[in-house]
Image (cartoon, helix red, strand yellow):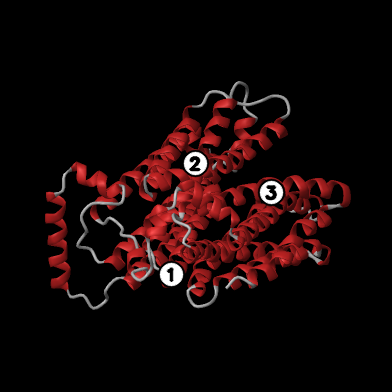
């Protein structure tokens, strides 16, 4: 009886400690978002002005009907009384929350899926469990890659607002299917639907930031939005494991689906209260915009595929994600066989990369507003090639592996924040129309790198060893560095 009470007390203490860690991570992520909101707001606004502004918001909301709300969701409607800078900060918070929820749903499955696949049929499988796991994880990247162009078309035909809200709703439905699934193929279908929704979240969210933020603050906004993605990646396995252990599969994913749908409702309300406005009118007053409006979707897509600068940035995205894709599975094998590291410690070591990504993304975003973004992308390529080099030098000790993982996370944070801003700048510079198609192209490169990298790298590692497999994928990053430095 005493042992039972002691074990239950330990479980409660462990749960409390885990909750405290989760709250610390949430507060660390929310702090820069709030600072960004305060920094972009008017610090000298008096309380009376604030009250007058609030009264205007209430009267404005009461006069708008449901049809005007739908119009603002699509990007039109009357202008809000909220200052443009505050609306921009709300857009960043909205996109960061969407990316957080997207990555949270995707990574919650990491500690759970092995248990689900090992369950008795029809939910689990009895033969070829490794193949089933590989198919399950690959289905997300394949569906995301194939859905990215359609997400770009959705953003272009309607608006990033519609694409973002629709994708969040789709993500919530896909997560709910995980709760009610009865067979492995239903789980596989839900995972593929998550990948398709993730493509629309990225395309819609990044397009929304690019449209609402001028070039001089676009990098900072992208950096803070990417920190939301990193926070979801960091917290997903922890939350998924805790909830699954205490609530079971169905209640865990019902709770997660409810959280996503609540996020979608909050987005719709925010679009009605503070509809974002495009920044292109502010910075392109002296530019002939007829070319932009007359560009057809097919013509602008062809121009994107023929633009050397955009293809170079897209190639850097592919190369960096290919290295990530090959190091991720090989790191588990190396830590187990060569260093004898336990599963818990392996998870901690891998989380170093996510934490480095979380820290580097907003810093790189701020830096990208103060220096050439192409140079930051080149820096990320150098860091990623150094990460692959330290992976090959792991015979010097476990510290080399720590450095490799940390450099990988920093490179990811620098590349994502700077490259997404650079792509928007190139669209403006070459007058290529909508931002959505260039982000769809970037998403395709992202997913393709995560597919091709493991296929080529693991094949080479089986023949020549893990070091050769990782170095062969890291060399293209070094070769692309001078190409990025030449982009003005």
Q: Residue furthest right?
A: 464
Q: Residue at x 57, y 73 (%)?
A: 488
Q: Quadrant of residue 378?
A: bottom right
Between 465 and 274, the one lying in front of the other is 274
Circle 2 Cα neighbour tier, 10 Å, few/some/many (<14 / 14–19 / ≥20)? some
User: For the residue labelled by badge 1, is the local secondary structure a helix, a strand or a loop?
Assistant: helix
Report which residue position mark 3 lands on.
343
Report which residue position mark 1 lands on.
215
Q: Position of residue 67 (x, y in %)?
A: 20, 42
Q: Position of residue 46 (x, y in %)?
A: 18, 75
In 3D space, how far apart are the residues under numbered discs 1 and 3 (Cα atoms)? 44 Å
Q: Residue at x 39, y 64 (%)?
A: 33
Q: Which mark is residue 150?
A: 2
Q: Quadrant of residue 27?
A: bottom left
Q: On the rendered structure, is 452 left or right of 70?
A: right
User: Which mark sits nearer the N-terminus, 3 or 2?
Assistant: 2
């Amino acid at each position: 009886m005493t042992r039972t009470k002691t074990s239950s007390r330990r479980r409660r203490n462990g749960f409390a400690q885990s909750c405290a860690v989760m709250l610390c991570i949430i507060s660390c992520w929310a702090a820069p978002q709030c600072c960004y909101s305060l920094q972009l707001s008017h610090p000298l606004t008096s309380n009376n002005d604030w009250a007058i502004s609030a009264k205007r918001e209430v009267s404005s909301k009461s006069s708008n009907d449901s049809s005007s709300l739908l119009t603002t969701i699509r990007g039109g409607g009357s202008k809000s009384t909220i200052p443009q800078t505050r609306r921009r900060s709300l857009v960043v918070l909205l996109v960061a929350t969407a990316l957080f929820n997207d990555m949270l749903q995707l990574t919650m499955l990491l500690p759970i899926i092995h248990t689900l696949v090992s369950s008795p049929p029809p939910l689990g499988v009895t033969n070829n469990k490794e193949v089933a796991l590989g198919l399950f994880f690959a289905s997300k990247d394949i569906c995301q890659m194939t859905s990215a162009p359609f997400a770009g078309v959705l953003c272009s035909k309607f608006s990033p607002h519609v694409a973002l809200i629709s994708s969040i709703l789709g993500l919530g439905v896909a997560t709910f299917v995980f709760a009610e699934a009865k067979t492995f193929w239903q789980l596989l279908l839900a995972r593929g639907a998550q990948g398709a929704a993730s493509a629309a979240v990225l395309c819609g969210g990044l397009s929304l930031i690019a449209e609402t933020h001028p070039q001089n603050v676009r990098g900072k906004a992208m950096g803070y939005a990417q920190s939301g993605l990193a926070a979801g990646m960091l917290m997903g396995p922890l939350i998924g494991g805790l909830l699954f252990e205490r609530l079971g599969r169905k209640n865990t994913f019902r709770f997660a689906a409810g959280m996503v749908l609540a996020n979608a409702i909050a987005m719709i309300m925010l679009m009605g209260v503070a509809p974002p406005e495009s920044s292109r009118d502010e910075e392109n007053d002296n530019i002939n915009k007829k070319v932009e409006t007359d560009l057809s979707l097919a013509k602008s897509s062809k121009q994107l595929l023929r633009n050397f600068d955009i293809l170079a940035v897209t190639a850097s995205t592919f190369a960096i994600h290919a290295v990530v894709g090959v190091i991720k599975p090989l790191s588990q094998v190396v830590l187990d066989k060569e260093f004898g590291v336990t599963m818990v410690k392996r998870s901690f070591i891998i989380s170093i990369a996510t934490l480095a990504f979380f820290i580097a993304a907003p810093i790189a975003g701020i830096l990208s507003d103060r220096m050439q973004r192409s140079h930051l992308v080149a820096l990320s390529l150098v860091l990623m090639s150094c990460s692959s080099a330290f992976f090959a030098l792991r015979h010097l000790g476990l510290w080399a592996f720590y450095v490799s993982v940390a450099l990988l996370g920093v490179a990811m944070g620098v590349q994502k924040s700077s490259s997404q801003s650079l792509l928007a700048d190139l669209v403006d510079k070459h007058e290529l129309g909508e931002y959505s198609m260039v982000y769809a192209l970037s998403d395709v490169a992202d997913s393709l790198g995560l597919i091709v990298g493991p296929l080529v790298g693991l094949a080479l590692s089986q023949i020549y060893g893990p070091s050769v497999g990782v170095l062969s994928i890291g060399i293209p990053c070094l070769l692309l560095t001078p190409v990025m430095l030449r982009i003005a």
